[in-house]
Image (spheres, grey):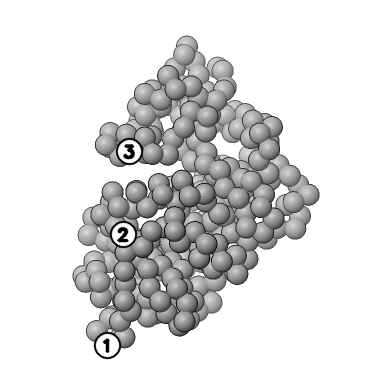
């Protein structure tokens, strides 16, 4: 088995492997590979010229010290080759390759509870927590906010200012934010801007299967009820779930959960870093 970065000629096989591993439709997989995937950001285990395992990454920076990190996603192995340790070996290769390229850390979001232990055995430790909120909101008597369409790349400075004020956070570049907005729109969603309590905020709302998933929310925690009421009014009978910065758990009834794991290659930087915020992962 050979471990290396992908080549452009690997991409068709990787699309097929992605569908095998994650069950996504050909249409969505084509969209993802056209908009986000690059060969130089894909790591593969190859046998006989065919990718048997894969892992992809997107770069980011931490707001505090500007350290560059790699967000790993799409870690998967062909059904025919599972149980042979390919993912473990590929992650070890990723560690050396990313460190050599100057990355200070790698971050990933386990797709299931059991995978927290799997990655923990491979050197990953808690990196971020989130809050889940799914309680119904009644908007009938609530004052409504004006919600308007917004551009996520243009909101990057506001995003940085808000989350950095709460601690360290993961900063995506404009290209990644543009992809997130395109993905959101593809699922019938929208990015909504508003003003509340004298500050500007936004909500990134995905739609699908009779529900709305708010994947990022920027607003004062004390204003969460007003914003949720406005969104409930906008979406009517659709159920709304929220993925929130863990600070919201001190203001409303939430479920506070472990979310992302990280592995630091720069241990000196790690010593001074708490648990940053990360949003917009392929969870």
- Locate residue 22, reporting x and y percent: 37, 38
Task: Please tell me which residue is depicted at 73% across the width and 52% down the height of the picture.
Answer: 270
Question: Dot 1: few (<14), some (14–19), or many (≥20) neighbours within 10 Å?
Answer: few
Give the residue at mark 2.
190
- Locate residue 203, reporting x and y percent: 39, 65
- The front one of 96 and 154 is 154
Task: Please tell me which residue is depicted at 38% across the width and 23% down the height of the picture.
Answer: 13
Q: Earlier in the sequence, mark 3 or mark 1?
A: 3
Number of numbered discs on residues: 3
- The front one of 268 and 81 is 268
Mark 3 to mark 2 CA distance (whole Å): 18 Å
Mark 3 secondary-structure assignment: helix
Task: Please tell me which residue is depicted at 34% across the width and 48% down the height of the picture.
Answer: 183
Question: Is residue 44 shown to the viewer in this render?
Answer: no
Residue sitting at the far top: 48
Give the residue at mark 1.
141
CB of mark 3 within 8 Å of CB of mark 2?
no
Give the residue at mark 3.
31
Mark 2 secondary-structure assignment: strand
Question: Dot 2: few (<14), some (14–19), or many (≥20) neighbours within 10 Å?
Answer: many
Task: Please tell me which residue is depicted at 37% across the width and 68% down the height of the picture.
Answer: 193
Please tell me whether mark 2 or mark 1 is closer to you in this view. 2
- Locate residue 188, reporting x and y percent: 25, 54
- Locate residue 129, reporting x and y percent: 55, 61
CB of mark 3 within 8 Å of CB of mark 1?
no
Question: Is residue 113 shown to the viewer in this render?
Answer: yes
Mark 3 to mark 1 CA distance (whole Å): 41 Å
Q: Earlier in the sequence, mark 3 or mark 2?
A: 3
Mark 1 secondary-structure assignment: loop
In the picture, the quarter occupied by the N terminus is: top right
């Amino acid at each position: 088995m050979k471990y290396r970065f992908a080549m452009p000629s690997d991409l068709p096989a990787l699309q097929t492997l992605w569908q095998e591993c994650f069950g996504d439709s050909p249409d969505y997989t084509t969209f993802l590979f056209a908009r986000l995937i690059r060969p130089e950001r894909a790591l593969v285990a190859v046998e006989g010229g065919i990718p048997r395992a894969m892992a992809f990454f997107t770069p980011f920076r931490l707001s505090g010290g500007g350290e560059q990190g790699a967000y790993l996603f799409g870690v998967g192995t062909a059904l025919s080759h599972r149980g042979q340790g390919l993912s473990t070996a590929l992650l070890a290769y990723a560690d050396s390759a990313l460190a050599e390229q100057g990355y200070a850390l790698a971050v990933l979001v386990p797709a299931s509870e059991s995978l927290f232990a799997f990655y923990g055995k491979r050197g990953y430790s808690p990196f971020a927590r989130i809050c889940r909120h799914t309680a119904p909101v009644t908007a009938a008597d609530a004052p409504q906010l004006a919600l308007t369409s917004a551009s996520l790349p243009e909101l990057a400075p506001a995003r940085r200012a808000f989350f950095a004020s709460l601690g360290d956070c993961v900063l995506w570049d404009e290209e990644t934010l543009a992809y997130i907005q395109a993905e959101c729109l593809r699922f019938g969603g929208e990015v909504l801007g508003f003003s509340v309590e004298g500050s500007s905020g936004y909500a990134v709302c995905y739609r699908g299967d009779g529900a709305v998933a708010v994947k990022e929310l920027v607003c004062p925690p004390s204003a969460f009820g007003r914003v949720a009421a406005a969104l409930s009014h906008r979406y009517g009978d659709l159920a709304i779930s929220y993925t929130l910065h863990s600070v919201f758990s001190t203001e409303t009834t939430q479920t506070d959960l472990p979310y992302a794991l990280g592995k630091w290659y720069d241990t000196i930087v790690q010593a001074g870093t708490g648990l940053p915020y990360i949003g917009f992962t392929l969870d």
